[in-house]
Amino acid sequence: MSEEEQTTTTDTGAGDKPEGTSLIEGANASAERIEKANAEQKALLDRQEELMARQRLGGNSNAGKKEEEPVEDTPEEYVKKVMNGEIGNEWFRYWNLYWWTEMVVKD
């Protein structure tokens, strides 16, 4: 065997390439991955900007929307809500109870 064949067949643990080239190749591979990720990020950012512009230009329109009309409670429903604590504070609740029992029920 010649001397060249002996140096290339020797196992250095890092393959057949010298250490200096493997570090450079690793750095180049990392740079390529970073460039690829940056390109993907730029595409996503452009897409997001386009969506935000469409939302701004679309605006908010009430066309075709129907507003719900408030439903008026009957006196009985109102008393039930007051008694359950859904309406008013404690003082108002007891005052309505007094008014309902003294004025309305006695009539």
Image (cartoon, grey):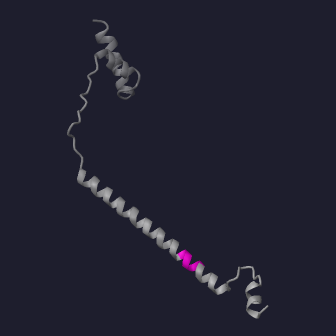
Q: Residue furthest front?
A: 1
User: Of 13 and 16, which appears nearest the observer?
Assistant: 16
Q: Which residues are magenta?
A: 26-30
Residue 38, percent from left and from top:
45, 70
Name the residue rendered at 24%, 28% in the picture.
69
Q: Residue at x 37, y 23 (%)?
A: 93
Give the image location of residue 99, x and y in percent: 31, 16
The vertical placement of 84 against 44, above or below, is above
Q: Main secondary structure of the magenta part?
A: helix
Residue furthest left in the image:
63
Residue lying at 73% horizontally and 92% vertically, measured from the top left: 4
* The N terminus sits in image quarter: bottom right
Q: Quadrant of residue 70?
A: top left
Image quarter of residue 106: top left
> Left or right of 39: which side holds 67?
left
- Where is the C terminus found, in terms of image quarters? top left
Q: Nearer the viewer, residue 10 or 23?
A: 10
Question: Would you place residue 27 above or below residue 73 in this image?
Answer: below
User: Is 12 displayed left or right of 65 in the figure?
Assistant: right
Residue at the spot x=32%, y=20% of the render? Answer: 78
Which residue reaches farthest right? 1
How many callouts does the rendering have? 0
Q: Position of residue 64 (x, y in %)?
A: 21, 36
Q: Position of residue 10 (x, y in %)?
A: 77, 84
Residue 35, compared with residue 84, is above or below; it is below
Image: 11 above or below 100: below
Question: Would residue 31 be found to the left or right of residue 105 on screen?
Answer: right
